[in-house]
Amino acid sequence: MNIDLLHSEVWGQKENLPLLIIRPSKGWCVNLREIWYYRELLYFFVWRDIKVRYKQTLIGAGWAILQPLLTMIIFTIFFGKIAKLPSEGIPYPIFSYSGLLLWTYFSSAVLNSSNSLIGNANLITKVYFPRIIVVFSSAVEGMIDYFIAISILFLMMMFYKISLNLYVIITPFLLFLAFLSATGIGLWLSALNVKYRDVRYAIPFFVQLLLFTTPVIYPSNIISEKFRWLFYLNPISGIIDAHRACILGYKPIDLSSLGISILVSIFLFITGALYFGRTERLFADII
Amino acid sequence: MSDTIIEVKNLSKRYLIGKRESYYTLRDTIVDTFKKPLRFFYRSKTNIEGKTDNYIWALKNVSFEVKQGEVVGIIGRNGAGKTTLLKILSRITEPTEGYVKIWGRVGSLLEIGTGFHPELTGRENIYLNGAILGMKKVEIDRKFDEIVSFAEIEKFIDTPVKHYSSGMYVRLAFAIAAHLEPEILIVDEVLAVGDIEFQKKCLGKMDDVAKRGRTVLFVSHNMAAINRLCHLGILLDKGVLKMMGSAENVVASYLSEAAKSEGERKWDDIKDAPGNDKVRLRAVRVRKLNGEITSVVDIRYPFYIEIEYDIFVPLLNFQIGYQLQTLDGLVVFSTGDIENKDWCQKQKEPGRYVSRCEVPGMFLNSMSYVITVGANVRGIEVFFHEEGVLKFDVAQTGNLLLERYGRLPGVICPSLRWDIFKK
């Protein structure tokens, strides 16, 4: 992988002033140094989105809890009680909620980051900054909801008298993995979205379908061993499995499936970043 | 070379015609691919060497240098490439050919209040907008009070900006950008908004910025502002650098060259005519009362300014009008045909129209004037705004006063009634 530090510009020194060269860029490149320079902007975008998010709403951050909670109730009634799906021996509400938590983060991160560029079109045509910042910030934003919603899981576990597993401390790492895979998909889709608006209509549908190939409603062990590897190509599957296992501690974390998820996430992220870097220069012209 | 701060060399930018602001859908690409199955594979090749008529060069081989501390005004008609040039300099879009070397931090203000969020308060927007423009948080902390007092919004600093008046909004936005303190400040036509007082303040601030050795690049349609503020002028025409020199010379040359002086300007080919698929400007002429078309009118007598245009869709509240400017850019007055009481409430059906304005005699002074024509539905849509369409001269001829004193100073020369009493 060729990650070029020097994009279309070269920073040098002349009379104590930084020199910037603007010229047609070629090839695949991601300017890491510049992204680092703009890190504060990432913070401000996240801060803006969080601030604005629940303005003029009645229950505000309550939505962060209500969404997975209501989904969990519906799932419990239909999949748990009526369809009697197995839940690996833990109460179905806990089972589905622990999966939904991370799923809700992942799906909103994919949706938001994919629409982030066209949502900020006015900025992109008027100001320069590394466009990748917008994608990152919209994927970070949902983490707040995750942390709000996870507190409900702990309350539910107290109610069902399930003790907290020690491995709960690795959940931030799993959240980061979810971020990595969501951003990887987001980088691809947001760049495609600038060119093809079809993406905008396809994503909600795609995300909805993805839910059914993810072990949120059902445990992954109902998939036959033969197709398991295919199942884990969906990067969020292994992460959700590990997430559930590490909080509830009812089974060991399956390292091989998590390993596949990590590899797929990294692959998506790097190829996404490269594709993004390649098409970035056209955004302002065609958005 | 030592104090050159911006070096632009053979800069060119090519856009696809008609695709500049549109987007493809996947279907379009698929349909295109089926129509010309091989094109998909050869696309990159045809893009570079292929049919040139599908492209437009927004900039072509533009080269110039700017030295530290210079204030440069960039002028030209709509579509001359001014904004494209600024967008390349501020790195929003990439050039197709050529390069730019810039020494120092660039602050660009292509639109006032970019990135403002209506739900956030003034305080929050200062931080957000500052960060978007490239300021560090510590820097914003340091300049915060200065920004607030410059924008004169102390009382409303914790009010969401959606409740701001447009004046406050603009003041805040400019204040943030003005305190960016880059080595190079790029400003695009932002002074068109805001009240006169604040415009003066902004011009003052830009002057200030320049005096401290910063470089300013400034696009404006306000020729008087360019003259007042800039040392140098760059004239762009259809993407080509036409002239670079002292601001005064460039402005004068732009205005007089832009305006043909035959007394009439016609657009025979509808494709070239200013406007869009709703309205097109077809002709502008200066006519004496006896009907003769002329480029020189007698200072004593009234004359007509005639605007001929096509309307293609029924329009309500449509108005067409003009602005009279002196050659150094000062606007003498603006007027529109909405003044006509019979028509101002009526819907204009498709067809060819002439709006004719009578300009009184003994009103304009003996000098050259330039007509700028515009058409809009107020508050809804601007159909065109065509700078310097036509130039005409007002000639000094007899009048008791003028005979005695020659040309009087002033941009107008009205004959006013005087009463004299002996007490």
Image (cartoon, rainbow, N blue to C red):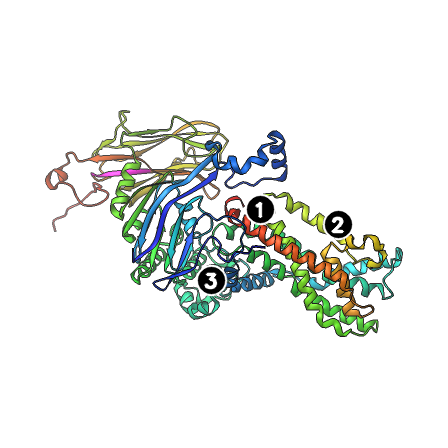
Badges 3 and 1, same chain = no
Tell me, for residue A209, which label it has, or none.
Answer: 2
**Where residue B233 sits: x, y (%)?**
30, 47
**Residue tagged by mark 3?**
B130
In the image, what residue occupies the spot 59% across and 35% down?
A: B40
Q: What subunit carries mark 3? A: B
Mark-to-mark CA distance, 3 and 1: 26 Å
Query: What residue range appears in magenta?
Result: B366-371
**Where residue B275 sits: x, y (%)?**
43, 34
Whether residue A213 is visible, yes or no, is no
Crowd band around label 2 with a 10 angstrom C-alpha radius: few (<14), some (14–19), many (20+): few
**Residue tagged by mark 1?**
A194
The nearer-to-camera label among 3 and 1 is: 1
Q: Residue flagged by tag 3: what amino acid is it?
A: Gly
Mark-to-mark CA distance, 2 and 3: 41 Å
Q: Residue flagged by tag 1: what amino acid is it?
A: Val
Whether residue B261 is visible, yes or no, is yes
Crowd band around label 1 with a 10 angstrom C-alpha radius: few (<14), some (14–19), many (20+): many
Question: Magenta stretch containing residue A169, yes or no?
Answer: no
- Rendered image quadrant of residue B56: top left
User: Which residue is nearer to you in this view: A108 or B32?
Assistant: B32
**Where residue B167 sits: x, y (%)?**
43, 56
Q: Earlier in the sequence, mark 2 or mark 1?
A: 1
Q: What subunit carries mark 1? A: A
Secondary structure under tag 2 reads: helix
Mark-to-mark CA distance, 2 and 1: 23 Å
Secondary structure under tag 3 reads: helix
User: Which residue is nearer to you in this view: A55 or B406?
Assistant: A55
Depicted A270 relative to depicted A165: above or below? above
